[in-house]
Image (cartoon, grey):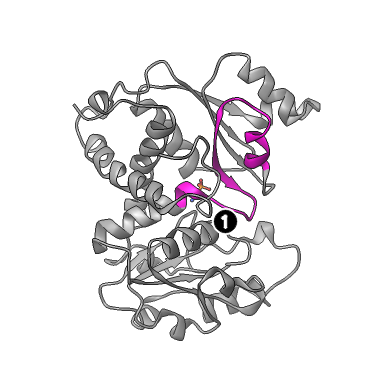
Amino acid sequence: MSFRHLITLQELPKEDIQEILNLAQSFKQVILRPIKKVPTLKGKTIVNMFFEPSTRTRTSFELAAKRLSADVLNIQMSTSSVVKGETLLDTLATIEAMQIDMVVIRHSASGVPLFLTKNIKSSVINAGDGMHEHPTQGLLDMFSIIEKKKKIEGLNVSIVGDIAHSRVARSNIWGLTKMGAKVKVVGPTTLMPKEIEKLGVTVCNDLKEGLKDADVVNILRVQLERQKKNLFPTLREYATLFGVNSEKLKYAKPDCVVMHPGPMNRGIEISPNVADGINSVINEQVTNGVAVRMAVLYLMGGGKKDEAFN
Ligand code: CP
């Protein structure tokens, strides 16, 4: 494995992505056992610092670390000394003085995790930075696709929705194109970043056309909190034109896999019967997130194979 920090899938070599995905398969077996814990990161300390709300990613990293027997510290940023004016680096210097090994960070500003790699000694994992990347979400999405489709290469993957504000879209695009998928991004022009096709994707502004022949449909949340101005007239209009419901899903392949990174806006970007339908793997994505994060923490923490899978 060639990385000490995990900041982007843009810079993660295909071989490392493959290694994480292979290892996650073994960890999935571990978390389905009655006793879900292995001693492989005993003695390591992992700190979760989330400056933005999170349900899935924060709990998933915490569970992954605990199942590897690491010590986990969850720092509530809203009750830390950051609110008294302490800088992020001073806060981290304080925490590092307690002899930690890894920092998992989510921040609203793109670039914060990369900035930390240049200023602290611990390994850094990006748990989502602004509109930049969410690498472990990209990895768990790829894992979930392989679990259902047995491969990524050659699949038609449609990523639908608010591409412009989505770090999940960026990590998916970098990861999936590297692994050989044909990626289509689908949404209104106002939610499409300029020159996104330079990342090797096809752009489509019509939902029916965008879903045509899709093996995988990854539906993104409309991120109203990141939009500085009104980028579509009303949520109702967005739901009518770009919300994926059972009728629209018929344009994709009958056995397509439906994914959503969560949290979902039911009735806006996804209808309840699609979210809960037979094609949906949304809850399995959450289970897989723990296995994938165990693989990442294991590799970055120098875990030992004989302690992980016996
Ligand atoms: N997918 C995702 O990042 O969800 P959370 O915001 O709940 O962590």
Residue at horizontal 76 percent and vertical 67 percent from the top: 229
Where is mark 1, residue-wise? Answer: 167
Residue at horizontal 58 percent and vertical 67 percent from the top: 162
Q: Is residue 171 visible?
A: yes
Marker count (numbered): 1
Q: Is residue 80 visible?
A: no
Observer-nearest residue: 179 or 125?
179
Image quarter for residue 190?
bottom right
**Is 128 a magenta residue?**
yes
Image quarter for residue 36?
top left
The secondary structure type at the circle numbered 1 is: helix
Q: Percent from the top left, x then y, of residue 250?
A: 33, 82
Q: Is mark 1 within 8 Å of ligand 1?
A: no
Instruction: Give, as a single range, the part of the protein colored magenta.
Output: 112-137
308 vs 8: above or below: above
Amino acid type of the residue tagged 1 in the rendering: Arg
Q: Quadrant of the C terminus?
A: top left
